[in-house]
Amino acid sequence: MKKPVIELKKVKTFRGMEGTGLNADVYVNGVKTCMIIDDATGGDMQYEVYNQKAFDAFKAYAASLPPEKWKGDDGKQHTIPQSIDFLIDDVFNAMMAEKEKERFTKSIAKKFINHIVFGIPGADGYRYVKFNRPLNEIPKAKLQEMVDKYKAKLGKGESFFNTNFKQLGINI
């Protein structure tokens, strides 16, 4: 079986005894397959199956994958058979990472109004220089001078994040 497209919809998360709990509908290749309930008590996920055929194919795909491997606290290599629980966890974690990336991008974009923002693309943090007025109110020559000053101080792999430099007539 080729790798299925797995989507989570109607996702609800909550704080549980053993971390984050999760309720969601699982779609496999566009088919509403099941609802998952992870009550965050340390046990297995529970499934309410909507489409048994799609669910069985999903389970068979997961079972066909190589086992999960990790190094335990004891220093030994451990393995456990792959399961739909692991696949759903991977999809959920990727989805949450994407949401965090969107939130991060939105928060930086707000700063472009009166900040010069720079850092390493893809990293968790950034640096900025705040001005007490919007950048479009700063004379172009003065703003270009400031950008050039900070450009000379950029660290390895750093670049400017401002997407408004071009419209402000700033060259980087």
Image (cartoon, grey):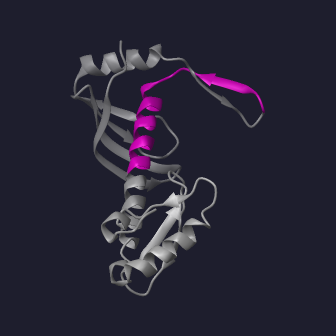
Q: Residue furthest right?
A: 75
Q: Nearer the viewer, residue 8 or 160?
A: 160
Q: Residue at x 43, y 30 (%)?
A: 87
Q: Nearer the viewer, residue 127 or 72?
A: 127
Q: Residue at x 40, y 37 (%)?
A: 91
Q: Nearer the viewer, residue 59 or 38?
A: 59
Residue 82 among magenta residues: yes
Q: Residue furthest bottom?
A: 132
Q: Residue at x 38, y 34 (%)?
A: 46
Residue 30 occupies quadrant: top left
Residue 36 occupies quadrant: top left
Question: Secondary structure of the magenta portion, mostly?
Answer: helix
The location of residue 55, given as percent across then percent down, is 30, 22
Q: Nearer the viewer, residue 10 or 103?
A: 103
The location of residue 160, given as percent across then percent down, is 48, 62
- Quadrant of the drawing holding the N terminus: top left
Residue 79 among magenta residues: yes
The vertical placement of 129 against 44, above or below, is below
The vertical placement of 42 against 70, above or below, is below
The location of residue 58, given as percent across then percent down, is 35, 20
Q: Which residues are magenta?
A: 75-98
The location of residue 22, given as percent across then percent down, is 38, 46
Q: How many marks are shown on the rendered structure? A: 0
Is residue 12 among the parts visible in the rendering? yes
Residue 154 occupies quadrant: bottom right
Q: Residue at x 54, y 17 (%)?
A: 66
The vertical placement of 131 against 163, above or below, is below
Is residue 14 among the parts visible in the rendering? no
